[in-house]
């Protein structure tokens, strides 16, 4: 499996798994499919939406991690000094929490529907939480 179908709010997206750069994170996320959550707007990080996942443990450490995902990149923060979360950048992001800068594993990149990512972010900012669902293609 190299791609996932993503329904985010009213938008249909496709994401490419970063299998070579983040193999453990991709494998753990694939095991969790179908993955259903909600995205809310980030508080400290800039132009991004996130899925707060509390103490959910994907069983991975850091790999292919970044604090500056580009628009359309998804990162998974495996937990530690802040709660587990998945973040999708739709503009400029400096990934952080109330305790400071964080780094998450870049494991998925939007390849189809990238033009809708900004609209998803703005919709979430202005209208609130949006449903999101990931599944195998």
Image (spheres, helix red, strand yellow):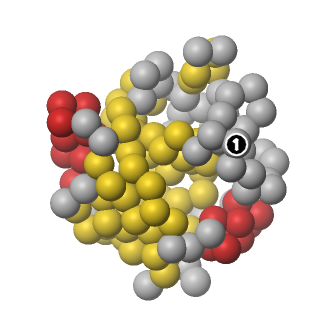
Measured from the top left, where is residue 17 in percent x and y?
A: 56, 68
Name the residue tied to disc 1. 55
Measured from the top left, where is residue 27 in percent x and y?
A: 71, 70
Residue 104 in view, yes or no: no
The answer to which image quadrant residue 46 occupies is top left
Residue at left 45%, top 68%? Answer: 134
With 63 as the anchor, is 4 left or right in this view?
Answer: left
- Is residue 109 shown above or below 92? below
Extreme front residue here? Answer: 55
With 86 as the anchor, is 15 left or right in this view?
Answer: left
**Count of labels in the image:** 1
The answer to which image quadrant residue 71 occupies is top left
Residue at left 55%, top 79%? Answer: 2
Circle 1: element type: loop
Residue at left 49%, top 81%? Answer: 136
With 98 as the anchor, is 42 left or right in this view?
Answer: left
Residue 31 in view, yes or no: yes
Q: Quadrant of the C terminus?
A: bottom left
- Label 1 Cα neighbours within 10 Å, binned few <14 / some 14-19 / many ≥20: few
The answer to which image quadrant residue 58 occupies is bottom right
Measured from the top left, where is residue 109 in percent x and y?
A: 47, 59
Q: Quadrant of the N terminus?
A: bottom right
- Is residue 31 shown above or below 119? below
Residue at left 62%, top 69%? Answer: 32
Measured from the top left, where is residue 52 in percent x and y?
A: 53, 40
Q: Nearer the viewer, residue 84 or 44?
A: 84
């Amino acid at each position: 499996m190299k791609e996932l179908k993503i329904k985010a709010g009213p938008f249909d997206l496709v994401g490419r798994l970063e299998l070579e750069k983040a193999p453990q994170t991709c494998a753990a996320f694939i095991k969790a499919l179908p993955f259903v959550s909600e995205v809310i707007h980030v508080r400290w990080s800039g132009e991004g939406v996130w899925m707060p996942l509390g103490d959910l443990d994907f069983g991975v450490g850091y790999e292919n991690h970044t604090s500056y995902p580009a628009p359309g990149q998804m990162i998974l923060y495996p937990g530690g000094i802040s709660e587990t979360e998945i973040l999708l950048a739709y503009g400029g992001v400096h990934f952080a929490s109330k305790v400071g800068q964080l780094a998450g594993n870049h494991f998925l990149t939007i390849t189809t529907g990238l033009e809708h990512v900004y609209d998803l972010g703005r919709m979430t900012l202005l209208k609130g939480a949006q449903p999101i669902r990931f599944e195998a293609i």
